[in-house]
Image (spheres, rainbow, N blue to C red):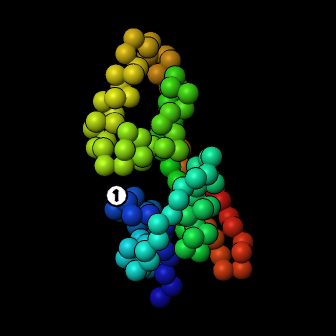
Amino acid sequence: MKRLIFATGNQNKMREIREILADLPVEILSMKEAGIEADIVEDGKTFEENAIIKAKTIMELADDSGLEIDYLNKEPGIYSARYMGEDTSYRIKNTNLIERLTGVPDEKRTARFVCAIAAAFPDGTIKTT
């Protein structure tokens, strides 16, 4: 059976990926499940650049995603996972973001979840979406 390895350690993300790709005849693995230990530095300036960095590191699939809040100049953006520290709970992070929006009218509280996915192939080809 073919394997598809995602450059992520996020188990919730892996659950979602497996649900989305359930009909494919491939084994879906996280880096950890595939026995890949890599300290990947996400120093890109965009979600797409970070996804490519991760995919090229393991030569498989990777993504980078996060929350962009318009009023906060698209923060936390590409730093969503590391916002306020990697070990800070999402409850604390979300509380901080809501507090920063105190007094901001509802019509200016626009935001979006952004995700870029990159696939890196052994021949050097990279595909992103």
Please tell me which residue is depicted at 48% across the width and 74% down the height of the picture: 5
Locate the C terminus by quadrant.
bottom right
Percent from the top left, x then y, of residue 29? 42, 74
**Element type at marker 1?**
helix
Percent from the top left, x then y, of residue 42? 54, 55
Question: Residue 14 versus residue 93: which sits nearer the camera?
Answer: 93
Residue 67 to residue 97: above or below: below
Q: Is residue 27 visible?
A: yes
Please tell me which residue is depicted at 71% across the width and 80% down the height of the picture: 123
Estimate how packed mark 1 is, as few (under 14), some (14 to 19) or many (20 or more) residues with alpha carbons within 10 Å. few
Occupied quadrant, residue 18 = bottom left
- Answer with left or right where residue 12 lies relative to residue 7: left
- Answer with left or right where residue 60 lies relative to residue 76: right
Percent from the top left, x then y, of residue 2? 51, 85
Residue 73 to residue 50: above or below: above
| Count of labels in the image | 1
Please tell me which residue is depicted at 55% across the width and 64% down the height of the picture: 54
Occupied quadrant, residue 120 = bottom right
Occupied quadrant, residue 33 = bottom left
Please tell me which residue is depicted at 44% across the width and 77% down the height of the picture: 36
- Answer with left or right where residue 96 lies relative to residue 116: left
Q: Is residue 22 visible?
A: no
Residue type marked 1: Asn
Mark 1 — residue? 12
